[in-house]
């Protein structure tokens, strides 16, 4: 079987934002043991379907740890995001053929079919999470799904949310406790057709990320449209504009340190290559999230589910063994 290298990230539950004492893994198991329509949620995938965006696309905790192992230290899951509609565009010819062009065709998969938007795999041990994102399904989707699931089950109150903080470090592995300021790179504006991407979250990271380009950031900073248009006119047709947004807290003219907990939360869903942290000196070599790369078996464009969760758990075990996370596993 073929294989491909993927990045496995570490996250941890932000317990400051929720009530109660149960670990995240315990809360998930409790939700799996809950009864819906006379059946355990964990034994019926249909009861785990949630329409998060209210657009008839469905997020499902699909493949999960066997119920016989729920009392062990690790719970693993596969999150799938399906979109409505059974029609997909495809090239049906062999790419080995000689042709003046390859013809696109609309293919109907059947009325009962749903098209896969993306897959995410995760493992939970206590309040620790290892996750493997896809291009279409990110950690934010997992946060929103678990929030909805646990609110429905009752272990989260309305208004509380699952926030899965990242663990930011310098490239040499060292971890500053605080930072004087944070630099965030906004998406370059490459012309009127450029698509805005998600790059900024608010200071509490409780609002969904919205598309923000350099011009969007300038609007946030108070630039009016005339000033922005003047700057836009300076950009040549074959050029673009880039910008970096620096966040600092000041009191009486002096910078106040930003806590590492705030950094781990507010920037958890931002690519570390877009960040810079200044603390006791600049974090030389850039900023990285606690993560590792693993070779995972694939079947076409899909990861092998068993291998994916096994590699996530192996990565978490290695982080625990090296003291990077305080996590206990069953022997």
Image (tube, rainbow, N blue to C red):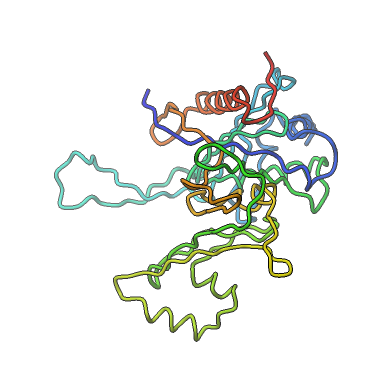
Q: Where residue 194 sits: x, y (%)?
A: 41, 66
Q: Where residue 134 sits: x, y (%)?
A: 49, 42
Q: Nearer the viewer, residue 109 or 62?
A: 62
**Can residue 184 be spotted in the picture?**
yes
Does residue 297 appear left or right of residue 151 in this picture? left
Residue that lies at the very extreme toward the bottom in this rendered image: 226
**Can residue 144 be spotted in the picture?**
no
Total numbered circles:
0
Does residue 49 appear left or right of residue 134 in this picture? right
Q: Nearer the viewer, residue 35 or 64?
A: 64
Residue that lies at the very extreme toward the top in this rendered image: 331
Examine the image and state in which quarter residue 66 appears. top right
Q: Quadrant of the N terminus?
A: top left
Q: Quadrant of the C terminus?
A: top right
Examine the image and state in which quarter residue 183 appears. bottom right
Q: Nearer the viewer, residue 87 or 51?
A: 51
Seen in the picture, residue 204 relative to 29 is either above or below; the reply is below
Does residue 296 appear left or right of residue 254 in this picture? left
**Which residue sits at x=54%, y=43%?**
170
Does residue 84 appear left or right of residue 101 in this picture? right
Q: Where residue 323 sits: x, y (%)?
A: 63, 27
Q: Nearer the viewer, residue 148 or 271?
A: 271
**Which residue sits at x=25%, y=43%?**
93
Examine the image and state in which quarter residue 313 appears. top right
**Which residue sits at x=41%, y=78%?**
232
**Which residue sits at x=73%, y=42%?**
149
Seen in the picture, residue 29 relative to 186 is either above or below; the reply is above
Q: Where residue 7 sits: x, y (%)?
A: 48, 36
């Amino acid at each position: 079987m073929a294989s491909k290298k993927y990045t496995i990230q570490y996250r941890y539950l932000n317990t400051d934002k929720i009530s109660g004492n149960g670990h995240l893994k315990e809360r998930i198991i409790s939700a799996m043991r809950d009864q819906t329509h006379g059946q355990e949620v964990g034994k019926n995938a249909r009861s785990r379907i949630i329409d998060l965006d209210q657009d008839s696309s469905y997020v499902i905790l699909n493949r999960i740890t066997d119920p016989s192992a729920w009392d062990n230290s690790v719970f693993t899951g596969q999150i799938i995001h399906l979109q409505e509609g059974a029609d997909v565009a495809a090239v049906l010819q062999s790419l080995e053929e000689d042709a003046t062009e390859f013809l696109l065709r609309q293919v109907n998969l059947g009325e009962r079919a749903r098209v896969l938007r993306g897959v995410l795999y995760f493992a939970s041990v206590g309040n620790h999470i290892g996750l493997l994102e896809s291009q279409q399904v990110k950690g934010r989707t997992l946060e929103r799904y678990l929030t909805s699931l646990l609110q429905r089950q009752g272990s989260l109150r309305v208004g509380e949310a699952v926030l899965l903080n990242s663990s930011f470090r310098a490239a040499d592995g060292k971890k500053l406790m605080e930072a004087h300021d944070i630099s965030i790179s906004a998406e370059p504006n490459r012309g009127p057709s450029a698509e805005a991407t998600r790059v900024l979250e608010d200071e509490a990271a409780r609002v969904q990320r919205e598309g923000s380009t350099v011009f969007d950031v300038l609007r946030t900073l108070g630039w009016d449209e005339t000033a922005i248009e003047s700057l836009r006119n300076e950009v040549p047709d074959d050029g673009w504009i880039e910008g970096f947004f620096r966040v600092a807290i000041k009191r009486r003219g002096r910078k106040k340190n930003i806590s590492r907990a705030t950094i781990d939360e507010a920037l958890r869903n931002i690519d570390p290559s877009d960040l810079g942290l200044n603390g006791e000196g600049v974090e030389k070599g850039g900023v990285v999230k606690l993560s590792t790369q693993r070779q995972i078996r694939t079947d076409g464009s899909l990861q092998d589910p068993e291998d994916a969760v096994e590699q996530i758990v192996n990565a978490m075990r290695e982080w625990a063994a090296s003291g990077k996370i305080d996590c206990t596993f069953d022997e």
